[in-house]
Image (cartoon, rainbow, N blue to C red):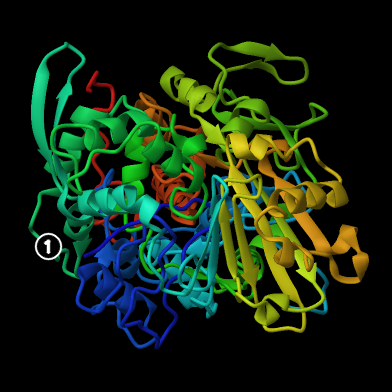
Amino acid sequence: MKPVTFGIFLRGKGLSSNQFPTKQKHMPWLIPNRSIKKDTLAGKAAKLMLAADTSAEERIYYKYVDTPEFSYGLWKYKAGDRIATFNTKPTEKVAIIGAGLAGLSSAYELLKCGVGVSLFEASDRIGGRLYSKKFSESDPEIAELGAMRFPPSEELLFDYFNQFKIATTPDFPDPLTVNTLISYKNNTYNVPAHGEVPGEFNTVHEGWNDFAENGATIEYTDHTGMQKKVTLAAPNDIADALMIDADGNPKSTKVDPVEAWKSYMEVFLNKSLFDGLVTIFNGPNPPGGTAWNYPEDYERFASLGTGFGGFGPLYQVGFLEIMRLITNGLEVGQVFVPKGIETVAHKLYSKDVVQPDGTTAKVSDNTTTNCPIGGVYKSGDKIVVLDKSGQQVAGSPFDRVIVATTQRSMEIDTNLGLFDPFTLPEVGNVEPTMPSEVAQSIRDIHIMNSSKVFIRTKDKFWNNLKEGTRCILSDSLSANLYTLDYGGDYGVVLVSYVWGDQSIKQISFQNPKERLAILKEALAPFAPDFIEHLNPLNDDYDQNVQFIDWELKPHYYGAFKLTRPGQDHYVQSAFFHYLEKSDSNGGQVYLAGDSISWTGGWTEGALQTGMNAACSLIQSIGGTLNSPDYNPMVSIKPDLYDYNQAYG
């Protein structure tokens, strides 16, 4: 059986090189993730990606369900060290806005091809939501305030892991892989490592796993009022069908992934997660054999979800957003980075690159930090980039610009959501940089808020507790708690990780002592022995309590994109916009970032869009992509699916 799970920003356990479990090792509680046993295709793919001695020819490559014709990992393998070549060194002036993963990766790949770039970052640090904050410079303990764990289906990211020799590990205390305390409606369960799901959750647990493994036959009413019956392919089978070998051959032909996804679109395109669950689990043929009780089973799902946080705040998110996590293999074999994921950003930023003419350069050579952007506008055949004072930044105007920020920053900071021309005092007449449908997408795509609270403790106290608790899941304000061991003398506890409404409950408490106090108070009724030890090292709250509320962070305005029902056509417009900008006309602006990708909240969304923008830009200034028959410009079909249909 190959069950699945869900997680955003806080990812699940996986495999390191030369390790492969015979048991299911990553099993967030309630809905375990797909088994990564050797005898499953998902397990084999994960093992091959993570093994140090796997060649590019032996690997299994991943396609994503919204771009099922194309594997970014296979393309990078085919393209070689550089993604493109030029007959002569390009002279066009290129700016990139945002030094997160999308901006840094596009700058790095362009620089390798000989394209000069100017990178502008609003803050004093690079990395964006790759944010590994050290408690002190001399100790190894880290608070991963942003992206945290990463599945092998994130091919572009793992390519950089390999390039930069960045070590990964599966050693994370996922629920039920370690001793776990579960508290729900005043019932407390101490579950030993690899123990059984408490009985009151069996209906939800078994129903979801049956659906993931076997699909479902459902009856529903479409938008015209007609009653319909359809059999949905198993999400796990769709994921298997999207895996290919180095020659592009599918590893499974059990289902046609495109037709299977169209069936899901027909039913769920305009349905929320909650609506989708009702359609599947309260119909005449519920997976698992037992219909979910309302409200009890839905409250269980809402309160504790998969162990990475309750689904309650996500009930109004589009159902297809959740399905993408399964079909794209994002919940299988996840790893995390002991030195901090921000290491990837620093490597992209500071690594010397040998350009085609033999000169050496690095992205940091032409990067300006502490430079918030106040606008990006088209002026004739150039792009004007302004700072917050209204003055043009150094190098402006530019021939090409990549805006690699959250879509809220695109709207608020760079004004990419404008529809009409207007006049700037020191520039003159300017025009919007985006077509109206893309501008509307930038304005309206939903972004989720998220909060994390970490504490560094004087020791790894959990090792001495009677129950040996490493993980606490609850329907309290804390929601999800994990104990972390970075190999040093001190302990780290992720006291709370929440999103949506649960994040909003905490954001009024911006004092670290007050924030920790309310969380300890929430944990006290069911974990009194545990919270006695939740005190920061040396009683230093400023240094040893680290927290973040992404909604409040300037120039981010939220954590990650999760579309609402009926918003997928916005993502379609924004994600595929790069295909419209590859001509040689001057004054082109490209979008990048996970917020305009199909996989918001995942590093691969940032990298895919960064590569899309870089390829389109290269082609527009006369470059030739090094894999001419297989690349993002020729292999991806933007109209394969019609997300404007009134399905469901």
Q: In this image, 378 relative to 236: left or right?
A: right
Seen from the viewer's position, the closer of residues 557 and 273 is 273
Q: Is residue 129 above or below residue 395?
A: below
Q: Position of residue 426 (x, y in %)?
A: 77, 20
Query: Which residue occupies 70% across, 56% down?
Result: 126
Q: Amino acid at mark 1?
A: Ser
Quadrant of the image occupied by residue 21: bottom left
Q: Quadrant of the N terminus?
A: bottom left
Q: Position of residue 615 (x, y in %)?
A: 40, 50
Q: Which residue has dot 1 on it?
A: 252
Q: Quadrant of the C terminus?
A: top left
Q: Position of residue 306 (x, y in %)?
A: 43, 53
Q: Is residue 230 above or below residue 130?
A: above
Disc 1 crowd rating (10 Å Cα; few below 14, some 14-19, many 20+) is some
Q: Is residue 486 visible?
A: no
Q: In this image, 619 relative to 445: left or right?
A: left
Query: Which residue occupies 51% across, 27% down?
Result: 442
Label 1 sits on a secondary structure element that is: loop
Seen from the viewer's position, the closer of residues 547 and 440 is 547
Seen from the viewer's position, the closer of residues 62 and 88 is 62
Q: Is residue 591 visible?
A: yes
Q: In this image, 209 relative to 617: left or right?
A: left
Query: Which residue occupies 35% across, 61% down?
Result: 33
Q: How many marks?
A: 1
Q: Is residue 560 above or below residue 409?
A: below
Q: In this image, 607 relative to 62: left or right?
A: right
Query: Which residue occupies 39% across, 26% down?
Result: 567
Quadrant of the image occupied by residue 5: bottom left
